[in-house]
Image (cartoon, rainbow, N blue to C red):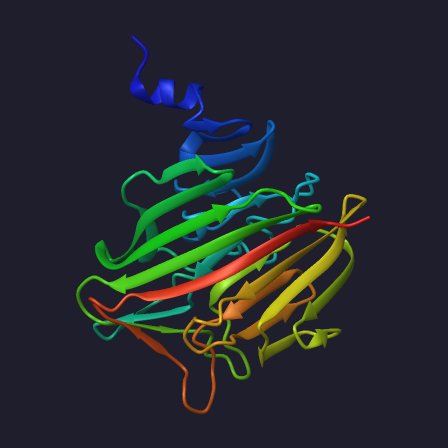
Amino acid sequence: MRSALSLLLAFPLLATAQLEWKVGENQRYQFSENGKPVLTYNAGIESRPDAPADRARCCYVYPLLTPGGVSLLDDFPKDHYHHRGLFWAWPYVEVDGKVYDIWMKMASIRAVTGAPPAATVKGGVARIEASNFWEADGARIVSEKVRIAVHPVKNASRTLDLELVFEALNKPVQLQGSREKGKSYGGLNVRFAPREQMVIRSSEGAVPKDTDLVPHSWAEMEAVYGGKRAVVRFEADPRNPHAPPQWCLRHYGFIGAAFPGRTESVSSYTLEKGKPLTLRYRVTLTDLP
């Protein structure tokens, strides 16, 4: 008799018309349209034999493709093994006087999947909702809910809505970005695949040099990937705390919407039980001529 797991892997999790979710190896939730991949949400722990063991991680999006099939993201790049497609993480997580790093060194702290994610397709919109936890020294300290809505293609563009909800489970948990002088990366982040002819723009115009701590309502990267030109824009919801965010923009292929950022009055954010933090973003992927 075939096991329930083998049946789940063999057939679509849920399909409507030509949109479908499938669960692949290692809890990879794969969404496709007309048989073409769109994105994968990685619910299982991912690792690489050539990467340090403390870079193993779960709960992020990779790969992510434009309507024309351009694969935009990178995972486990050799210059920054901890970079992982489209992800959310902080280098400074403090609870009960102890500091952890869920951004890069995920040995004593890491995100883990709770119940299997719920993946649906309704009205032409594909959705996935995951309930995760941050575990520090074996104890769960934060609940994390991830909600992604994938909208139909329109005029060579596809839009994703991303909602992240964090709440301390017991004791308060303090989040900070990088504590390096002049920086504050940490929050929503994306690492791009190898590319050519790259241009970074923001809501304030072109960004010809790397920048930190500059507020923008959106940032985007346009480039050529394997001969195909595409642009991806990240917009922060104005309802987010401390909006608009300060951005970390890097021409080696990184965009991050820093939260909580670093100003004269704000440099950290404390998660508390019963007071969830909600961060919302829109991601727009467009193929260009």
- Residue situated in front as seen by the camera: 141 or 127: 127
Tell how many labels: 0
Q: Position of residue 145 (x, y in %)?
A: 34, 53
Name the one closer to the observer, 75 or 276. 276
Above or below, 227 against 262 in this view is above
Is residue 284 placed above or below 259 in the rendered structure? above
Quarter of image, res 239:
bottom left
Task: Locate the N terminus by quadrant.
Answer: top left
Q: Residue at x 33, y 22 (%)?
A: 5
The residue furthest bottom is 264
| Residue 175 in view, yes or no | yes
Q: Residue furthest front?
A: 123
Q: Residue furthest top?
A: 1
* Relative to 237, 223 lies left or right: right
**Above or below — where is 172 with respect to 220?**
below
Residue visible at 49% across and 63% down? 188
Q: Position of residue 248 (x, y in %)?
A: 58, 71
Identity of the residue drawn at 42% across and 57% down: 163
Q: Is residue 209 above or below residue 220?
A: below
Q: Position of residue 182 (x, y in %)?
A: 55, 83
Residue 285 placed where, x, y %?
A: 64, 51
Q: Nearer the viewer, residue 248 or 150?
A: 150
Asked which quadrant contains residue 221, the reply is: bottom right
